[in-house]
Image (cartoon, rainbow, N blue to C red):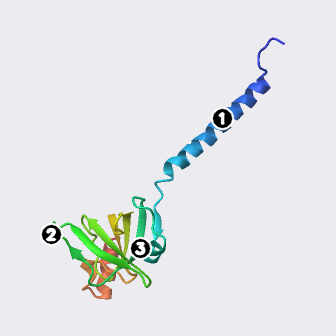
Amino acid sequence: MNGAIKAKHQRLVLVIVALVALIGAGLLAAWALRNQASYFYLPAQIASAPPEPGRAVRLGGMVEAGSLKKEADGITLSFVVGDDKARVPVRFAGIAPDLFKEGSGVVAEGRMGPDGTFVADNLLAKHDEKYVPREMKDMTEAQARQTVEETR
């Protein structure tokens, strides 16, 4: 033998190296994304088993009536999100969506603070299936249909 690797063995080594590289890339991607996952919690779940402070999560529930307060800086809102079993205080600094109001559904994206307050980075207001845009709320059903037809 002249010491050279046979073509058959070269292909086998190449396939093994490619397989190891592919598995390594997959593991690296999974490791990089593990902290990017944002889990969804209800107030009762946060009360019974809160996520560790600083972990990105979503909190979904209803904004309790009478809990919405605007702070002195004019952009910070504090309110309570609740369900039938628990209540979670929330603080948000920013511009709230137009549909955000007391008694409505909300999904808040953010983190639990060390004091037990949920610090929201983003608010997503939920609306019911009867939602009608502001511009169309005073229209009759026939006028609304005509407006929709004209925009097609």
Does dot 3 land on a helix, a strand or a loop? Answer: strand
Mark pair 3, 1: CA separation: 44 Å
Q: Is residue 90 left or right of residue 69?
A: right
Q: Which residue is mark 3?
A: 60
Residue 26 vertical position relative to residue 101 in the rendered view, above or below: above
Give the crowd class for mark 3: few <14, some 14-19, many >=20 residues within 10 Å.
many
* Residue at horizontal 79 percent and vertical 13 percent from the top: 3
Does dot 2 land on a helix, a strand or a loop? Answer: loop
Q: Which residue is mark 1?
A: 18
Residue 107 quadrant: bottom left
Of the 4 image quadrants, the one containing the N terminus is top right
Residue 70 lies, in percent from the top left, at 20, 73
Q: Residue furthest front?
A: 115
Residue 76 lies, in percent from the top left, at 22, 67
Judging depth in this view, the residue of 104 and 67 nearest the camera is 67
Residue 107 vertical position relative to residue 38 in the rendered view, above or below: below
Residue 138 lies, in percent from the top left, at 24, 86
Which numbered mark, 1 or 2, is in the foreground of this view?
2
Judging depth in this view, the residue of 94 and 89 nearest the camera is 89
Residue type for callout 1: Ala
Is any atom of residue 146 visible in this view?
Answer: yes
Residue type for callout 3: Gly
Residue 4 vertical position relative to residue 95 in the rendered view, above or below: above
Residue type for callout 2: Ala
* Residue at horizontal 75 percent and vertical 31 percent from the top: 12
Q: Which residue is mark 2?
A: 72
Q: Residue furthest top?
A: 2
Q: Is residue 74 left or right of residue 142?
A: left
